[in-house]
Image (spheres, rainbow, N blue to C red):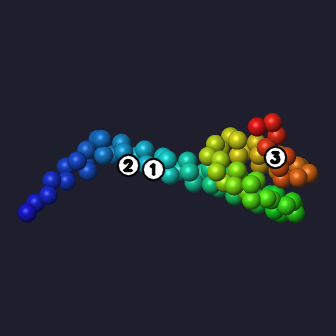
């Protein structure tokens, strides 16, 4: 019994796979960005509350994470990385 696999070779299937790959890359980039922010805060010896850690890890916007990373270098306390946001 032969199974029709033509859909999996179609343009639509390839588009779906490409979209999934792109989403995976974006999520991976955001996760790495969040981990970088936390690493800087921890290496500086700043206390990182569960609330701050959760907010950082939930962020999916690479630009926001870059701003937080830049602030993490000099913030006197972890909460201040968020600025006016």
Q: Residue at x 74, y 54 (%)?
A: 51
Give the labeled residue for mark 1: 21
Seen as rendered, the residue at the extreme top is 84
State the CA–CA distance, disc 1 to disc 3: 31 Å
State the CA–CA distance, disc 1 to disc 2: 6 Å
Q: Left or right of 31: which side holds 13?
A: left
Q: Residue at x 30, y 46 (%)?
A: 13
Answer yes or no: do the residues labelled 1 and 2 have beta carbons within 8 Å?
yes
Seen as rendered, the residue at the extreme left is 1
Q: Nearer the viewer, mark 1 or mark 3?
A: 3
Where residue 73 appears, x then y in whole percent?
Answer: 85, 51
Answer yes or no: do the residues labelled 3 and 2 have beta carbons within 8 Å?
no
Give the labeled residue for mark 2: 17
In the rendered structure, which disc, 3 or 2, sits on the residue that comes first in sequence?
2
In the rendered structure, which disc, 1 or 3, sits on the residue that comes first in sequence?
1
State the CA–CA distance, disc 3 to disc 2: 36 Å
Q: Residue at x 88, y 52 (%)?
A: 77
Give the labeled residue for mark 3: 81
Q: Residue at x 79, y 43 (%)?
A: 82
Q: Secondary structure at mark 2?
A: helix
Where residue 25 appears, x then y in whole percent?
Answer: 53, 50
């Amino acid at each position: 019994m032969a199974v029709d696999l033509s859909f999996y070779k179609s343009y639509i299937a390839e588009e779906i796979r490409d979209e999934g790959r792109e989403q995976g890359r974006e999520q991976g980039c955001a996760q790495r960005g969040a981990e970088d922010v936390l690493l800087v805060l921890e290496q500086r010896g700043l206390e990182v509350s569960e609330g701050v850690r959760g907010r950082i890890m939930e962020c999916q916007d690479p630009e926001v994470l870059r701003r937080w990373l830049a602030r993490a270098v000099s913030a006197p306390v972890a909460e201040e990385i968020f600025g006016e946001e």
